[in-house]
Image (spheres, rainbow, N blue to C red):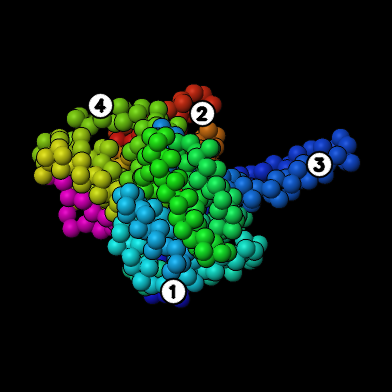
Amino acid sequence: MGAANSVKISKNYFPLSPFHLAGIGAVQLAVIILFFEFRFAVIPILFFLAVCGVAPFLPGSGFFLPVTSRGSRKKKAIALTFDDGPDPSVTPEVMKLLSKYSIQATFFVTGKNASRNPEIIHEILNQGHTIGNHSYDHDPVLMFRSKNELYQDIVKTQQVLSGFSINAYAFRPPAGITNPRLRKVLLELGMHCINFSCRAFDAGNRRITSLAVKILRKVKSGDIILLHDISPLNKNDINKLLNEFEELISGLKEKKIDIIPLADLTGKEIMGKIPVKHVSTVQSYYNQYAFSYDEIQANSGVRKARNIEFQIVSSKLPDIIKQSDNVLELGSGTGMYTIPIAKICSKLTAVDISCNMLKIAKNKIKSEKLTNVHLISADIENCSFKEKYDVICSFSSFEYVKDIKGMIKLLSGYIKPGGLLYFTTANRSLLRFFTQIGNAIIQGVWLRSYSKNDILKTLDTAGIEVLKTSTFLCKSFITKGMIIEILAVKK
């Protein structure tokens, strides 16, 4: 990567997006039309190309990659973001204004300006603001360059920020312009794209007249507001710019709209400390989403599936786990199953790849006053243990495992003779295939699914005998159930 402290994501990503699906669909439709009227076969292709031409200039479009351009509208709040700085004439004055109203903002800085003004970057961090990556020199045609040029530009800014002991997770492309290559670059760097939903079209502070009025006229709850902390064309207008900012803040207060940190509004981390050199795409994803994970699970489309799985599993835990058991839980996440398991068993070791998810779990364990849980941050596919367990369990985590046969064989060595292996995982079916596509679009990872026969053979080879197997969730003759449940015993 060129920087000793830069994060490197292991290449297990799957950069699928609506762009890919639309392209495939356009070609298929063109082929079908070709059999009926060859003159019209080009229409789907032309339509696809037209969409590709417009999508880059829509800041909220997720056509090429997942883009966060607003937060939840349920929160009567917005976030302030400032682009293109730091500027020695403007940014310090902006921070004084923010301090006056106890506001935390996010500054999307360019690498060039950050390297020129290190003292301002330090002050931004000292005052509790967050920093995002806004390319190195704000090249207006950056998004039209090659993948390698785009990659190097973003990395160059990451290297500058690493000098301040921070790693930017959030990237905002110049002018909010996206392209198909950006998804893969951000996955490789463990970053996500954050744009905006409300702006005054100030052209980088070239048009600052009535800036506040323009924004206040259309601002809505959940908006990410785009501003700029760079000097206007006429430096005599800096006070005018600051007055517009203050008028905007006052106007938001009059509307009773709170101004909150961008991370709180979006549920995604904007920056962190310099990470370990090698992380996986999965680890990066869950570290960024950890602090909003429970809320997302409770309010998104997966809520029903999660609730059904939890009800089924939690009802069976008392019959599977004894009070004297030493238990290992793999893929514990924020502790959804960790808490009920810990309330039953004597000792529990909970493992998850995301240290931030474990922080949430730790707080839950503390609030429940449980003292029998040991948390480990590790990849469940490669971790090792110093003891054997009465029960090993895992719920909807094996989908992330690249080598299920190797992992089951590994786990077999950690189960006591007569000990149990209890887990749920994705069952291979047509309906599951579509959810795999959805996950690849959202997370950039292709989740694996397994047939009942595949799992039975794998367990038998590892010396583990199946006691019970069943499927649930959307179960029918066609769909077969989206989740498979296995209870097995070490021979």
Quadrant in the rendering for residue 377: bottom left
- Residue displayed at 55% across by 43% down: 214
Where residue 483 appears, as percent x and y from the top left, is 41, 34
Q: Is residue 384 magenta?
A: yes
Of the numbered discs 1 and 2, the one sitting upstream in the chain is 1
Residue at mark 2: 479
Q: Which mark is residue 344?
A: none
The 10 Å Cα crowd at callout 4, few under 14, some 14 to 19, many 20 or more, is few
Residue at mark 4: 315
Where residue 247 appears, as percent x and y from the top left, is 44, 46
Residue at mark 1: 115
Q: Which mark is residue 43?
A: 3
Of the numbered discs 2 and 3, the one sitting upstream in the chain is 3
Instruction: Tell me the amino acid under the disc marked 2.
Output: Thr
Where residue 430 appears, as percent x and y from the top left, is 55, 34
Question: In this picture, is 330 found above or below 488?
Answer: below
From mark 1 to mark 4, how far is it between C-alphas?
Answer: 57 Å
Report the mark closest to the observer, 2 or 3. 3
Of the numbered discs 2 and 4, the one sitting upstream in the chain is 4
From mark 2 to mark 4, how far is it between C-alphas?
Answer: 24 Å
From mark 4 to mark 3, how far is it between C-alphas?
Answer: 55 Å
Secondary structure type for disc 1? helix
